[in-house]
Image (cartoon, helix red, strand yellow):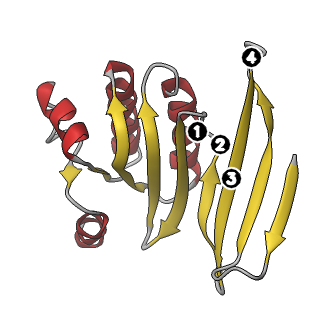
């Protein structure tokens, strides 16, 4: 695993690359990029899967997770485990930005429901920023109100401040 920092890029970036071996002895290559700001790190990379990538930001008394890729049966166990631990350790208000997600299957929907319930149990808020594809999938199973779908991160942040 390699870790290198570049000071020529604005904002400064740090890169981490390596090979991860899972419990089925499959090797996965990964590259993590972390953006820095004068006040510190503003986006922490999440170690998810090859098909699902993401970052975590803590701001305005909430955790903002930005995800890209596929939220399916392959990525769901890692997704649920990583986000569940972050929900337990960080601020209790959660925003998931799924606007860059290409596909969600029933496993992904199940994980979203479990994470929403976990957030409710700790008296937090749980909101999901979606795109048309994710919204259609969530509405198909009539979970749009329970999962508190939002149209933008700014709208979700406003809701967090007013609650």
Is 5 placed left or right of 72 in the picture? right
Crowdedness near tag 4: few (<14), some (14–19) or many (≥20) residues, C-alpha within 10 Å: few
> x%, y% of residue 29?
73, 36
Q: CA distance from mark 4 to mark 1?
A: 16 Å
| Front residue (pair 160, 13) | 13
> x%, y% of residue 122?
41, 46
Q: Please tell me which residue is depicted at 74% across the width and 16% down the height of the picture.
A: 23
Which residue, given by chain and number where applicable, does mark 3 sit on? 32
Residue 90 image-quadrant placement: bottom right
Q: Given this view, does label 3 or label 2 mark the residue nearer the observer?
A: 3
Is 81 placed left or right of 62 in the picture? right
| Front residue (pair 118, 63) | 63
Q: Given this view, does label 4 or label 1 mark the residue nearer the observer?
A: 4
Is 156 placed left or right of 76 in the picture? left
Which mark is first along the chain, 2 or 3?
Answer: 3
Q: For the residue labelled by badge 2, is the local secondary structure a helix, a strand or a loop?
A: loop
Q: Please tell me which residue is depicted at 33% across the width and 43% down the height of the picture.
A: 120
Residue 148 in the image: above or below residue 52: below
Is mark 2 in CB contact (under 8 Å) with mark 1?
yes
Q: For the residue labelled by badge 3, is the local secondary structure a helix, a strand or a loop?
A: strand
Which residue, given by chain and number where applicable, does mark 1 sit on? 82
Q: CA distance from mark 2 to mark 1?
A: 8 Å
Which mark is first along the chain, 2 or 4?
Answer: 4
Which mark is first along the chain, 3 or 1?
Answer: 3
Which mark is first along the chain, 1 or 2?
Answer: 2
> x%, y% of residue 86?
56, 48
Q: Which mark is residue 23?
A: 4
């Amino acid at each position: 695993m390699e870790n290198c920092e570049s000071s020529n890029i604005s904002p400064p970036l740090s890169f981490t690359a390596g090979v991860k071996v899972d419990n089925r002895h499959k090797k996965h290559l990964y590259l993590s990029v972390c953006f820095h700001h004068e006040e510190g790190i503003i986006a922490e990379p999440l170690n998810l899967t090859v098909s699902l990538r993401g970052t975590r930001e803590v701001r305005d008394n909430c955790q903002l997770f930005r995800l890209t890729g596929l939220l399916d049966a392959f990525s769901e166990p890692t997704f649920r485990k990583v986000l569940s631990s972050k929900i337990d350790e960080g601020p209790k208000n959660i925003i998931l930005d799924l606007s860059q997600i290409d596909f969600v299957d029933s496993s992904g929907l199940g994980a979203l429901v479990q994470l929403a319930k976990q957030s409710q149990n700790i008296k937090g808020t749980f909101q999901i920023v979606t795109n048309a594809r994710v919204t259609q999938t969530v509405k198909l199973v009539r979970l749009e109100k329970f999962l508190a779908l939002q149209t933008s991160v700014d709208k979700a942040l406003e809701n967090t401040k007013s609650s």
